[in-house]
Each structure stands twice: as C-alpha cells, then as structure tokens.
Image (cartoon, helix red, strand yellow):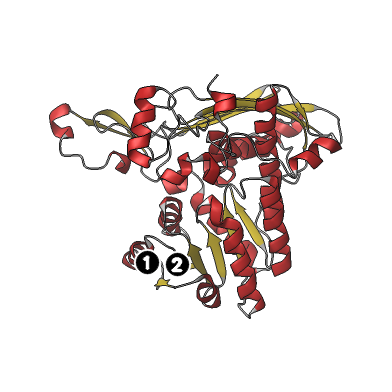
C-alpha cells in the first residue's frame, strides 16, 4: 500500500482530533508538525500510538520539504499567511501532493478567494475538511434511502444543528479574530451537511443552486452579567465591548437546476447547550421517507454518583464539550470516527495519491464561506438575501460582518 506522509500545521484541539482519527486510517503516516504551541505533545502522541515518526519542524518550509501533504489546522487569523508560506515552499521545490484546510476555509469571502487563488497557484490538489459530510451515519442514511429517492424524489427539507456550551480557546470567542461567533464557527457545518443531504443521488456536491438565505443571530447566554464575567475571567474576552453571537438560526433555499424544484436547509447552532456535551442533530425529510441522526444516542451509558464524581478529573473524557462529570452520562466510545474525521482523512489520501482534489475542495469551502457571510448580512439587515443577485455577490466580495468588525453590540445587545 502506498503511504502518504502527512504534516500538520497547528497542534491544538482539532489537530489532536485528527491525530486520534489517524489511529483508524490505513496508509497515512503523521510525519511532522509545525506549531507555535503543543507541537512536542502532538509528536509524542503520534509516536506513542505508532502513527508515524512525527518530527517537530521549526517552520512551514521545512515541514513541506519532508511531507507529501500538509493540513492547515491553525487558528483562522493565520490561514492566509500560512498558505502563502506553503506556496513559497512549493515554488522552492517542495513536492506536495495535497493541501488540506480545516473548516471554515476563511473568515470572509475575500480571504476565501485568496486561499483558492493560492491553491491554484501552487498547482497542488486541495481538500476542504468538513467532517460532518463524511459521517458514517449520514452516508449510511443516504445509501439506505437511495432507492426511495430515485422512486419518490430527492429529500426536500433538511434540519441540522450543532450545539455545545462554548469553544475551548480564547481566540474562538473573539469575533475580530475568529471571524464572528457561532454562525462562523458551526453553522458552516450545518449548512454544508444540509446541502449535501439535499443533493439528488449521483449529482455533484454543488449541483443545487443556492437561491436565498435568511438568518437571525442573538446573544442569549454569554452576554448576561454572570456569564460575561466568567468568560472575561477565563479567556480575557470582554463581551460587554466586543460580543459575538452565541445563537443563530436560518434557512437556505436551494433550487434544482433541472426541475426548478426548491428545497430547504434549516440550521440552528448555539454555544449555550448546557446538557451532556456536543450534540449533532440532523433530520432529512423526503416524500414518503425520512432519516434522523442524533450524536447523543450512544450504545454506552455511564453513571457516576456524587461521591464518586470527586475522582473525575476530565469531564471531556466522555464527550467533547461535556459540562458534567456525574449522573447518567452520554459517552461516545469513538468520537473521531462518529463525527467523520477518519473518513475525510481516507478520502484525502485516496484523492491526493492519484493527483486529484478531495470530495470537497477549496472552491467548495469558498461557497460555504459565501453562505455563512450572507447569513450575517441577512441577520444585520433583517431580511432575506437574494443569492442570485449579482450585486449581492459583488457586495459579499468585500463584506465583513459588524460582529467580526468588533461592533456586535450594534446588532446583538439592543
């Protein structure tokens, strides 16, 4: 089996999730990492779990020289600069077979277009990592319903949500660095997986045309004085000055270009889900059939009483973003596989080794960025945005939401 030597740029939470996923992937070696923090820890994890002889490299250029493909898992503000360094390394002779970028591709449409242009300049295949599209539960649901879709017609409505109690790192909470709040952070997941599930059998991932979007953003929990103080104490981010939304909801309307039929993607996301931990909930409704995915339904349950709970050091050992360490807990035995991380790595390996883009390339990531930014525009203007309007598309090219500008108080705290 031909192996792919993969290098990581970034060694934080999502990089470690991908490293965990690599334990289930054949044919990929974690060959190197470059990161300002936690690089040694990630390299040690790779060696302990026999994922590859992972070396820590001092810069992007050295990493690229010694790897077949590079995954950009660093924070959003650094994406463009890092990919510029990758392109320079390729021009200097690094023979890369693939470039990966974790969601979201970028904070604005302008940044996303810059990354797409850099990818093309490098002449290296790309993969946009949107893990939920690769979830086995989603793929199995669509496979099971393929005969029904062909007989009765495609799925017409998908409802998708991702919710938890809030991000790990301070930069995620800062809208001027992250690019917004929960809409930028998690609605990109929900919109993408909904678009994918609505797509008729056998059609490409961008077959359905986005027609319109409406959305609402709100600050429901983390703007309250008690929680605002907690956030400031933990992260140094002051939501009395530069708040981001902790809740969003909306609907994207798509049109089938062959039949003219409209379909709907309804998304709801929050950083205020104070239950077991991260929850993914997807429903697809078609004529005469349906599916439902709920990531909190697990074959494993654990109960911990009050006295025994004193021995628990890490609530997140049971579930990502878990906020409780006692009572009846939802435990997922293999989150990295459940959420699709392993399968998107498999897809990238297969594609890169034959010189192709992954199922989702950076151009696809650009389209998701456009939809998220149009969602912010819809929320600010309190009206439905016509995505077929050329003037709107031109405006999106230079648009930065008020929340991402640090002016969230103008739209969230009225």
Residue 75 seen anywhere in this rendered image of the structure: yes
x and y percentages locating residue 254 in the rendered image: 76, 31
x and y percentages locating residue 318 in the rendered image: 32, 40
Q: Residue furthest top?
A: 414
Q: Which residue is mark 2?
A: 33
- Left/right placement of residue 191 relative to residue 384 reads left
Q: Residue furthest bottom?
A: 93
x and y percentages locating residue 359 in the rendered image: 66, 53
Q: Which residue is mark 1?
A: 43
Residue 347 seen anywhere in this rendered image of the structure: no
Upstream in sequence: badge 2 or badge 1: 2
User: Which structural element holds mark 1?
Assistant: helix
**CA–CA distance in space, label 2 to label 1:** 7 Å
> In the depicted view, which residue is nearer to us: 168 or 282?
168
The residue lying at 30 percent from left, 43 percent from top is 317
- Left/right placement of residue 359 relative to residue 293 reads right
User: Which structural element holds mark 2?
Assistant: strand
């Amino acid at each position: 089996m031909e192996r792919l030597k993969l290098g990581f740029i970034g060694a934080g939470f999502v990089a470690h999730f991908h490293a965990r996923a690599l334990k289930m992937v054949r044919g990929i070696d974690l060959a190197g990492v470059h990161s300002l923090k936690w690089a040694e820890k990630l390299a040690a994890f790779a060696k302990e779990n026999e994922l590859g002889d992972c070396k820590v490299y001092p810069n992007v250029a050295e990493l690229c020289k010694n790897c077949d493909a590079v995954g950009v898992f660093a924070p959003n503000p650094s994406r463009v600069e890092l990919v510029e360094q990758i392109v320079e390394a390729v021009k200097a002779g690094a023979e890369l077979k693939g470039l990966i970028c974790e969601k979201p591709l970028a904070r604005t449409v302008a940044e996303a277009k810059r990354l797409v242009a850099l990818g093309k300049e490098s002449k290296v295949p790309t993969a946009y990592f949107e893990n939920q599209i690769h979830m086995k539960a989603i793929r199995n649901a669509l496979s099971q319903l393929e005969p029904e879709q062909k007989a009765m017609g495609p799925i017409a409505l998908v409802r998708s949500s991702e919710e938890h109690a809030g991000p790990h790192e301070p930069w995620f909470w800062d809208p001027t660095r992250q690019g917004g709040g929960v809409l930028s952070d998690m609605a990109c997941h929900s919109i993408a997986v909904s678009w994918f599930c609505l797509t008729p059998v056998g059609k490409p991932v961008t077959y359905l045309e986005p027609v319109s979007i409406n959305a609402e953003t709100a600050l429901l929990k983390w703007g309250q004085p008690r929680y605002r103080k907690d956030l400031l104490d933990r992260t140094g981010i002051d939501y009395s000055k530069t708040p981001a939304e902790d809740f969003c909801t909306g609907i994207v309307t798509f049109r089938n270009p062959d039949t003219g039929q409209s379909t709907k993607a309804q998304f709801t996301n929050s950083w205020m889900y104070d239950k077991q931990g991260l929850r993914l909930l997807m429903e697809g409704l078609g004529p005469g059939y349906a599916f439902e995915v709920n990531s909190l339904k697990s074959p494993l349950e654990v109960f911990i009483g009050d006295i025994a709970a004193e021995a628990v050091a890490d609530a997140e050992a049971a579930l990502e973003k878990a906020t409780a360490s006692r009572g009846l807990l939802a435990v997922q035995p293999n989150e990295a596989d459940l959420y699709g991380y392993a399968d998107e790595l498999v897809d990238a390996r297969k594609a890169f080794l034959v010189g192709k883009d992954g199922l989702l390339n950076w151009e696809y990531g650009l389209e998701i960025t456009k939809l998220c930014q149009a969602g912010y525009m819809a929320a600010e203007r309190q009206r439905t945005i016509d995505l077929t309007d050329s003037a709107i598309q031109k405006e999106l090219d230079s648009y930065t939401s008020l929340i991402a500008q640090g002016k969230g108080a103008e739209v969230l705290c009225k």
